[in-house]
Amino acid sequence: MGKACLYFKRLADLDAAILETLIAESIAEVRRRHTVVGGA
């Protein structure tokens, strides 16, 4: 598990669609790694 920082000078510098995809894929990966298989 790791972390990352995103640095930008202006909100206008961000592409909202790319940021949304990055976040969604990151959440999916965390869920994939930490899902309990087989119940309780």
Image (cartoon, rainbow, N blue to C red):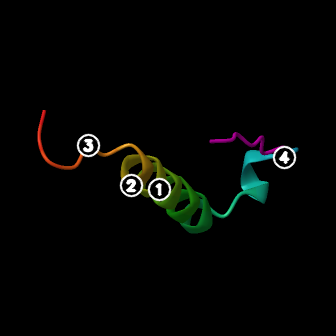
x, y percentage for residue 7? 84, 43
- What is the number of the mark on residue 32? 2
Identify the residue under disc 4: 8
Q: Nearer the viewer, residue 21 or 29?
A: 29
Q: Nearer the viewer, residue 12 or 7?
A: 7
The Cα atoms of the two marked residues, 2 and 4, are separated by 29 Å
What residue range appears in magenta?
Answer: 1-7
Please name which of the two marks, 2 or 3, marks the residue nearer to the observer.
Answer: 3
The Cα atoms of the two marked residues, 2 and 3, are separated by 9 Å
Q: Secondary structure at mark 2?
A: helix
Identify the residue under disc 1: 29
Of labels 2 and 4, earlier in sequence is 4
Residue 8 is inside the magenta segment = no
Q: Secondary structure at mark 1?
A: helix
Q: Amino acid at mark 3?
A: Val
Identify the residue under disc 3: 36
Q: Amino acid at mark 4?
A: Phe
Please name which of the two marks, 3 or 1, marks the residue nearer to the observer.
Answer: 3
Of labels 1 and 4, earlier in sequence is 4
Furthest residue to the top? 40
Furthest residue to the right? 9
Q: Residues within 10 Å of mark 2 (few under 14, many from 20)?
A: few
